[in-house]
Image: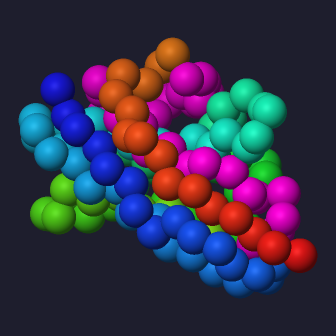
Amino acid sequence: QVQLVESGGGLVQAGGSLRLSCAASGRTFSWYAMAWFRQAPGKEREFVAAISWSGTSTYYADSAKGRFTISRDNAKNTVYLRMNSLKPEDTADYYCAARNAGLIQSGSYYYTARYEYDYWGQGTQVTVSS
């Protein structure tokens, strides 16, 4: 198993930036593909971004493309989500997730569904004010 703890959330004005971190412990971090999801009040949890075990492959939801960057440091057992140009609609709880496999895709199919990830953190809250 792997345990995940998110941090870095907070209150920011529209147009601002935040960097979320997710620290992993337990089994070898570099075995896992990692992802960020978010859940706004009253809405379903949705995929934001994913990164392969090596960091060489990334994938983003349309809402995140061009504004968010996912990265990882396997030496520090940490995955990051850099969020720029934040909008009020980015307000949500952000969750880190790990997949029991190193890849984020199979051919042209990308793993973006909740059930495709095996371990979850408790979330960190991001609030973007207008």
Can residue 128 be seen in the rendering of this structure?
yes
Q: Residue, x 59% and y 30% (percent of image)?
A: 112
Q: How many discs appear?
A: 0
Looking at the rendered image, the quarter that the N terminus falls into is top left
Q: Position of residue 109 (x, y in %)?
A: 60, 24
Q: Position of residue 27 (x, y in %)?
A: 10, 35
Q: Residue, x 56% and y 49% (percent of image)?
A: 94
Looking at the rendered image, the quarter that the C terminus falls into is bottom right
Q: Residue, x 57% and y 70% (percent of image)?
A: 10
Residue lying at the far top in this picture: please name it.
115
Q: Position of residue 20 (x, y in %)?
A: 47, 65
Which portion, as a residue range, is magenta? 86-114
Q: Relative to the observer, which residue lies in front, 44 or 55?
A: 44
Query: In the rendered view, does 91 fall on the left or right side of 36?
Result: right
**Residue 112 colored in magenta in the image:** yes
Q: Position of residue 69 (x, y in %)?
A: 56, 65
Query: In the rendered view, does 35 fall on the left or right side of 25?
Result: right
**Residue 108 colored in magenta in the image:** yes
Quadrant of the image occupied by residue 73: bottom left
Quadrant of the image occupied by residue 96: top left
Relative vertical location of residue 54 with respect to residue 41 in this rendering, above or below: below
